[in-house]
Image (cartoon, rainbow, N blue to C red):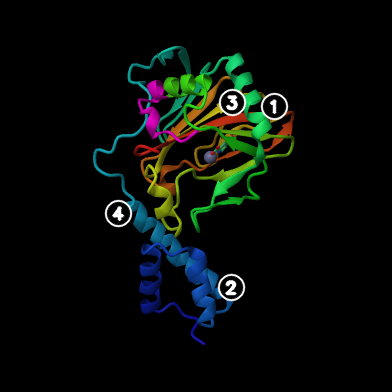
Amino acid sequence: MHQIITPELRSWLQEQAAEGHSRQSLLDALLKAGWQPELAAVALDSEWAAHQRQQASTAAAPAQGQRLPDLDLALSPRQIDAGDRWVDVVATLATPRVVVLGNLLSADECDALVAAARPRLTRSLTVQTQTGGEELNPDRTSQGMFFSRGESELLARIEARIARLVNWPVDHGEGMQVLRYGAGAQYKPHYDYFDPAEPGTPTILRRGGQRVATLVMYLSEPVRGGGTVFPDAGLEVAPVRGNAVFFSYDRPHPATGTLHGGAPVIEGEKWVATKWLRERVFE
Ligand code: PD2
Ligand code: ZN
């Protein structure tokens, strides 16, 4: 049995990874070839890390001149005109690009979104990048639903406000998602972009391209817990009703530093609305 990473095996693993085969499918191939599971995992992980570094420096590098959603913060304004409302700038972080916003939504708008979403909630699904379908994700213990873009006057009004705020067209946005977290519920740290190494990703990208930014809006305040955490930045954003956190990512790679999660709700209930922005028109 050959359990040593030969140069041939190393280049085979790197080729397979570059072609977009998943870590799991490569692991299966090694096991089928007679590798012991522990050694196969170690061999794969070292090659996988090399592949990730390679992607960060070349293939996944941002296209020159790529534009991203962003706010007009050059003159350090306290507030930004979002068309029908002045939105407060609470805090900004340059790398990763994170902006905490106050007063993006009125209390009435938060309540109206919750009321419209509540009867449509189901246990949260996430896009399954293996196949491009949707699946129940144990890392996500919230309940959720999606509105269609512009499905009501309320949605259209908020979407237009967001578009003006982050300088990104309404038609580049996905329909808004609403999540409800009860006590104990959380959303474990993840990236919002679609992993290029997953086989289902090309299918997902046909509709609008990659996600390039996220806006998480807080519709209710849990008593304790439920912050939005960015572990690599050491940042936690408190879930304050009407406030929001915006962040952008110029390539689908961990090097963006945009790992983030919803910390467990300790007491009370947390509702958020998430708006994901794509590179292109999302039909
Ligand atoms: O609810 C949150 O704080 C949260 C955290 C991480 C929401 C999302 N991600 C998301 O909707 O992608
Ligand atoms: Zn997220």
Q: Which residue is mark 3?
A: 218
In this rendering, which labeled residue sits more in front, label 4 or label 1?
Answer: 1
Q: Ligand 1 closer than 8 Å to the CB at disc 3?
A: yes
Alpha-carbon neighbours of circle 4 within 10 Å: few (<14), some, or many (≥20)?
A: few
Give the total of numbered labels: 4
- In the rendered structure, which segment of residues is drawn in magenta? 163-175
- Of 252 and 123, nearer the camera is 123
Q: Do residues under tags 1 and 2 come within 8 Å of each other at their CB atoms?
A: no
Give the x, y percent position of residue 282: 39, 38
Q: Which residue is mark 1?
A: 222
How far apart are the alpha carbons under marks 1 and 2? 42 Å
In this rendering, which labeled residue sits more in front, label 1 or label 2?
Answer: 1
Kindly indicate the quadrant of the structure image that contains residue 256: top left
Q: Could you tell whether 68 is left or right of 79 in the image?
A: left
Q: Earlier in the sequence, mark 3 or mark 4?
A: 4
Give the x, y percent position of residue 34: 54, 83
In this rendering, which labeled residue sits more in front, label 3 or label 4?
Answer: 3
Instruction: Name the element at disc 1.
Output: loop
Kindly indicate the quadrant of the structure image that contains residue 224: top right
Q: Earlier in the sequence, mark 3 or mark 2?
A: 2
Q: Is residue 197 above or below residue 172?
A: below
Q: Is residue 7 above or below residue 169?
A: below
Tag shown at residue 58? 4
How far apart are the alpha carbons under marks 4 and 1? 42 Å
Residue type, numbered disc 4: Thr
Kindly tell me whether residue 241 is visible in this rendering: no
Q: Earlier in the sequence, mark 1 or mark 2?
A: 2
